[in-house]
Every structure is written in structure tokens, then in C-alpha cells.
């Protein structure tokens, strides 16, 4: 997690200075994104909550991602990451919603994505942005770190 902390601190400091808040939906990063942001002293000023949304039932329970809201959107995609970011932002009434969804490895997922595939999204006052990261690595732990880092990079860009 040490590789995540400098950027998490930078993001946390920006959020505190702006008096803005975040909510998180993460999947294959397994809570590392939330842990990194919560490691920043004073995180309670900006971190409203997060969930590891690893299954469909978790999406319904934590995000209220009902069949009607989700439609035909599949997991591990930019549209799902964007929707998850929107839903968690709305549920916790935050300035920003962050989401990550992918396949950490060592194998791919049931949707045909290879290990090392993730989609990340940020939704906030400046709009919506999503992107895909492909590490091409089966290293589950390294991918989890890289996935969390990708979300931190994306929110940092939006805060700049």
C-alpha cells in the first residue's frame, strides 16, 4: 500500500482544501483504494464511505443497482464503472463518486477480460470520465495495487 499513499495524501489534501467529499465502489482492488484514502490524516472530512462491490447481490445491496438501473451493462466495463460511480455518489450524497471494476487475476473473468483488466470511473461536478487499464499481468496483488492507483490518478486529474 506504500505505493498508493503519496497520491492518496495529495488527493485527500485537495478534497479537504476544497471541502468536497467522495464515495467509493470498488471491486477487484479489494478495498485498497478506500484503505489508501482512509490512511490520510483527517480523512473523515472527505471520505463518506465505500464498499467492495464484488458480486451482483453486493451491487444491489450497496449501490441499489437494480436490474432496471443496470439494464444490459456488464461488469468490468466502462459503462458499469460509470454507473457504479454515479450510484455510490447518489447514495452517499457526495461531491465525487469513484468506481473500479475488473479482473485482478491470476485468470480473467467470465466476461472474457484477461487478468489485469480494469475499468475505472469518476463522476462529479465536472462530469463523468472512465477509462480502461490493461496490465497484461496475472499477478493478482500487483494488479490490485495498480487498479487502486489508476482510480487515484483519475480523481487527481479531475481535481487539478
Image (tube, rainbow, N blue to C red):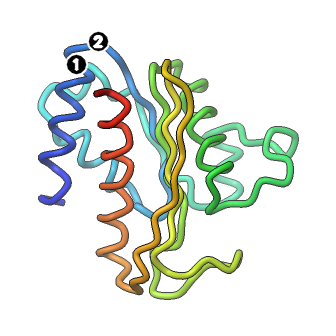
Q: Secondary structure at mark 2?
A: loop
From the viewer's perspective, is 131 left or right of 47? right
Q: CB atoms at circles 2 and 1 under 8 Å apart? A: yes
Image mark count: 2
Q: Residue at x 49, y 51 (%)?
A: 120
> Residue 154 in the image: x percent, y percent?
38, 43
Q: Nearer the viewer, residue 26 or 112?
A: 112
Q: How many angstroms separate mark 2 from mark 1 (CA)?
A: 5 Å
Q: Which residue is mark 1?
A: 16
Q: Quadrant of the C terminus?
A: top left
Q: Residue at x 51, y 52 (%)?
A: 131
- Which label sits on residue 97? none
Q: Residues within 10 Å of mark 1 (few under 14, many from 20)?
A: some
Q: Secondary structure at mark 1?
A: helix
Q: Nearer the viewer, residue 5 or 58?
A: 5
> Residue 16 in the image: x percent, y percent?
22, 19
Q: Residue at x 85, y 47 (%)?
A: 71
Q: Which residue is mark 2?
A: 19
Amino acid at each position: 500500500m506504500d505505493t498508493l499513499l503519496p497520491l492518496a495524501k495529495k488527493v485527500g489534501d485537495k478534497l479537504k482544501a476544497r471541502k468536497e467529499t467522495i464515495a467509493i465502489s470498488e471491486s477487484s482492488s479489494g478495498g485498497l483504494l478506500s484503505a489508501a484514502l482512509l490512511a490520510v490524516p483527517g480523512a473523515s472530512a472527505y471520505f463518506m464511505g465505500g464498499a467492495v462491490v464484488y458480486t451482483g447481490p453486493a451491487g444491489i445491496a450497496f449501490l441499489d443497482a437494480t436490474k432496471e438501473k443496470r439494464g444490459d451493462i456488464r461488469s468490468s466495463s466502462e459503462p458499469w464503472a460509470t454507473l457504479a460511480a454515479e450510484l455510490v455518489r447518489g447514495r452517499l450524497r457526495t461531491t465525487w463518486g469513484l468506481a473500479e471494476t475488473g479482473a485482478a487475476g491470476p485468470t480473467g473473468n467470465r466476461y472474457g477480460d484477461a487478468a489485469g483488466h480494469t475499468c475505472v470511473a469518476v463522476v462529479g461536478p465536472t462530469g463523468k470520465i472512465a477509462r480502461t487499464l490493461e496490465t497484461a499481468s496475472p499477478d493478482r496483488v500487483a494488479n490490485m495495487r495498480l487498479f487502486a492507483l489508476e482510480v487515484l490518478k483519475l480523481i487527481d486529474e479531475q481535481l487539478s
